[in-house]
Every structure is written in structure tokens, then in C-alpha cells.
Amino acid sequence: MPNPRDTISFVGIGAEYVTFRIDNATITYDATQPGGSAVVGRAVGLSAAGTVELVANGDEVLGKLIAVEPNLTATVQTGGYCTLPGGQGASLTLGKRIVGALGPGNARGYIREVNTSVAAELGVARGLIVDASTASATVVRL
């Protein structure tokens, strides 16, 4: 039996959760999906006051979509450690800050490291890549 002390995991440490409305365009409720939506687990940003949408390329990442409710609200992790999916061919370098990226088929809700030569991205970059060994579950600190 493996020793649980040999397993390193940051996920969930310092987690903070906030309830927002969903934009009902990039994020929709679907009772047949785990967590209430097919896009649970992806990166979100603000689209309007108190409303979240899936991030696009270069967008500021507010947090991770945790659950979507029938009343069109969502639980979003806005702080602490979590995993987010890396974008299609995205650079994910340890210690770099993150911004939104596009995934397969130009799907929204993915992340990549900030492009430091793009001033607009520097202004919205946040978090920190802690472990990118699994791109589809990149560990970040929000």
C-alpha cells in the first residue's frame, strides 16, 4: 500500500468560492451533466456585473467553474489552488502567470501562460502555474 505522505497535492488548499450568474451563452445549465453543465471545470471571467462567462484567448481568469444550478447561477472557485485545462498547444511554464486560452475547436475556458510582450495581457494576468505536468489538469494558484 502506498504511503499517502508520498503524494503531493495542492488542490483545494485555500479555496474560496463565490456565487455568480451565468451568461447563459458560453455557460448553460444541463441537468444531464455532472455539476450541471458540460463546461464545469473550465476557466471563467466576468462578462457583466455579477455574471461569468468562459474565458477567451488573452482574457483575465477570475476562477474555475465548479457547478451550475437550474436558476442560472454558478459556483466559481476564485482563490486557492485548483486545476484548469491548458489550451490547445498552450505554453504552460512553471511559475508563470495565466490568462485565458482557446482549446480544441476554438472552445473557450482554457488557460495558457501570459505573453509578457503583450501589454494588455500583463494587465490582466493573475495566478501562478504550480504544476503543468498534465496539461489538461494544470495546477494553478489563483
Image (cartoon, rainbow, N blue to C red):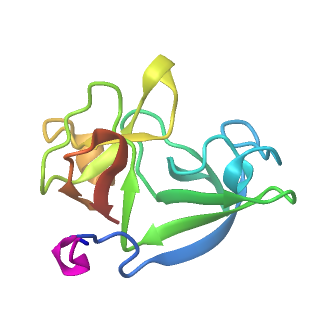
Q: Quadrant of the N terminus?
A: bottom left
Which of 20 and 117 lies nearest the eye of the viewer? 20
Residue furthest front as drawn: 1
- Residue 72: x and y in percent read 81, 55
Q: Position of residue 34 (x, y in %)?
A: 69, 51
Snapshot quadrant of residue 39: top right
Going 42% across and 29% down the picture, which residue do you hit? 102
Q: Position of residue 63 (x, y in %)?
A: 47, 60
- The residue segment tinted magenta is 2-7
Q: Residue at x 12, y 52 (%)?
A: 94
Identify which residue, 122 or 70, lies in the foreground: 70
Asked if the magenta segment contains residue 3, the reply would be yes
Name the side, left or right, on which 42 lies relative to 91: right
127 horizontally vs 69: left or right: left
Q: How many callouts does the rendering have?
A: 0
Q: Is residue 136 above or below residue 40?
A: above
